Image (spheres, coloured by chain):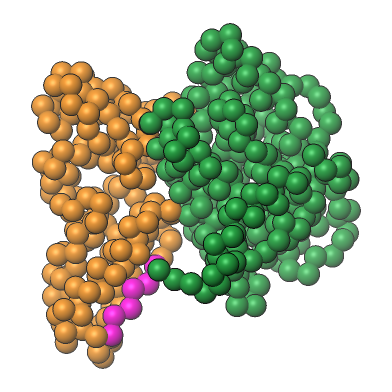
Chain colours: A orange, B green
């Protein structure tokens, strides 16, 4: 049977299907790993409520562990505490940037309701310019917004702060 | 428009068999119906970015509905999961407010409807995220984060349409005038609310919620150079299963695949 560290090692090879440069561990959705006898229980938290990638992630986790000889794999979903992009670490943020996705800014404190965007500039991941504009808060996937860089003229995705 | 929607709210003393189930259905159905309405725009949005935005918001709302209906199914204890509740109930069993079933109309109707609901939903979820029912508080806290994006999006559109061209202003005002009569129902308080407050410690001050909502709505309406309707006549009934005929048409489309192939998976 694998040790908890080895399980985390396996999970670190399971990539987010929509952002394939960061793993589910780096994304901060793995909340717990429990090993009992021959069974491994992975507790994960969903990113967006309607994210179609969650089932895919669940299946990928299962497949990765089965490939390492674990046959009794349970994937449990928890909603609380709600996932936040603040759980994405500095290394993963750099990987996002290198992949062409601007990393998320700080998530708004809970409970606060604002009708205007609190972030001023989102840095272009291609040329580093802060002269960018928001094209749409809703991008190719639920977790991304679309921006355009006024300096290098590239459109780019931003991982939205949640 | 069917007339039963003018019936008065049920008296507070009416006993409800399973109030928590009923309460969760109301919340889940609001989001399921509105989510489906928005998904009807997919491929028809006025610009590509908006087509994507409406589909994204639809996806979030259907995700929220799925969590809420799953919770409702657990509370009911009859073996109905979120899919069963979404696809195998008829219109009379739906508990959504009438506002969310109003057909899409033009883009202004869709956006004003969205804004009126988003403002209500953000405030309600914020309050529920602090309620003592653990499961509902978790769903509320999770959904609230996404709803804030929806509200910002819809309020910005209402301002842009109202303060836009003469035609967009006129259409936005018309949308606001016609949708206003459905907003009263969102803040009704009945026996279900009393019972969940007593049994599940989910107590929402509807008057406070209404006044916060009105402040938020007034601010955006003012910035949009629109005029707040003053007609106090309100249509209600959705919370008790009295729906407009448009819900039945919508459900026919939404449920056809699941009902034609029960238990199918792919």
Of residues B58 and B17, which is closer to you in this image?
A: B58
Which residue in the rendered view is the most extreme toward the top?
A: B166
The secondary structure that most of the magenta stretch takes on is strand
Question: Residue A7's x, y, as percent?
Answer: 18, 74
Q: Left or right: where does residue B1 sit relative to residue B202?
A: right
Question: Where is residue A98 drawn, in percent x and y?
Answer: 11, 41
The outermost residue toward the bottom is A37
Residue B237 vs B107, above or below: the answer is: below
Residue A110 visible? The answer is: no
Q: Does the magenta stretch include residue B27?
A: no
Quarter the N terminus of chain A occupies: bottom left
Q: Nearer the viewer, residue B99 or A132?
A: B99
Which residue lies at the image location 72% right of the left edge and 36% below the top edge? B183
Residue B261 vs B90, above or below: the answer is below
Instruction: Give how far across and how far down residue A106 sits, in percent.
Output: 30, 39
Which portion, as a residue range, is magenta?
Answer: A72-77
* Quarter of the image where one finds residue A25: bottom left
């Amino acid at each position: 049977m694998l040790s908890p560290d080895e399980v985390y090692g396996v999970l670190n090879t399971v990539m987010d299907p929509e952002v394939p440069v960061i793993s589910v561990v780096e994304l901060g959705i793995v909340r717990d790993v429990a090993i009992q006898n021959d069974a491994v229980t992975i507790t994960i938290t969903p990113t967006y409520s309607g994210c179609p990638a969650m089932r895919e992630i669940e299946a990928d986790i299962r497949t990765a562990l089965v490939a390492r000889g674990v046959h009794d794999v349970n994937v449990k979903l928890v909603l609380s505490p709600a996932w936040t992009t603040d759980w994405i670490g500095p290394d993963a943020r750099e990987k996002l940037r290198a992949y062409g996705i601007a990393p998320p800014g700080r998530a708004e404190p809970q409970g606060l309701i604002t009708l205007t965007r609190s972030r001023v500039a989102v840095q272009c991941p291609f040329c580093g310019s802060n002269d960018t504009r928001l094209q749409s808060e809703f991008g190719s996937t639920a977790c991304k917004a679309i921006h355009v860089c006024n300096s290098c003229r590239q459109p780019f995705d931003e991982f939205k702060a949640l | 428009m069917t007339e039963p929607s003018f019936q008065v709210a049920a008296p507070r003393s009416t006993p409800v068999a399973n109030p928590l189930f009923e309460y969760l259905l109301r919340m889940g159905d609001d989001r399921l119906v509105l989510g489906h309405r928005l998904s009807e725009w997919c491929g028809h949005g006025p610009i590509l970015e908006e087509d994507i935005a409406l589909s994204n918001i639809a996806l979030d709302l259907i995700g929220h509905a799925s969590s809420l209906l799953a919770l409702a199914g657990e509370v009911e204890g009859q073996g109905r999961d979120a899919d069963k509740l979404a696809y195998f109930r008829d219109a009379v069993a739906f508990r959504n407010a009438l506002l969310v079933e109003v057909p899409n109309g033009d883009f202004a109707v869709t956006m004003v409807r969205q804004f009126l609901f988003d403002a209500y939903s953000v405030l309600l979820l914020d309050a529920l995220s602090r309620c003592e029912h653990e499961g509902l508080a978790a769903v509320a806290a999770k959904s609230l984060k996404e709803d804030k994006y929806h509200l910002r999006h819809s309020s910005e559109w209402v301002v842009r349409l109202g303060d836009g061209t003469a035609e967009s202003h006129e259409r936005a005002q018309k949308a606001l005038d016609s949708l206003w009569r459905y907003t009263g129902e969102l803040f009704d308080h009945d026996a279900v609310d009393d019972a969940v407050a007593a049994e599940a410690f989910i107590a929402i001050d509807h008057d406070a919620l209404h006044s916060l909502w009105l402040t938020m709505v007034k601010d955006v309406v003012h910035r949009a150079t629109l005029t707040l309707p003053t007609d106090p006549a309100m249509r209600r009934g959705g919370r008790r299963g009295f729906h407009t005929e448009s819900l039945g048409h919508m459900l026919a489309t939404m449920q056809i695949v699941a009902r034609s192939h029960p238990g199918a998976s792919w």
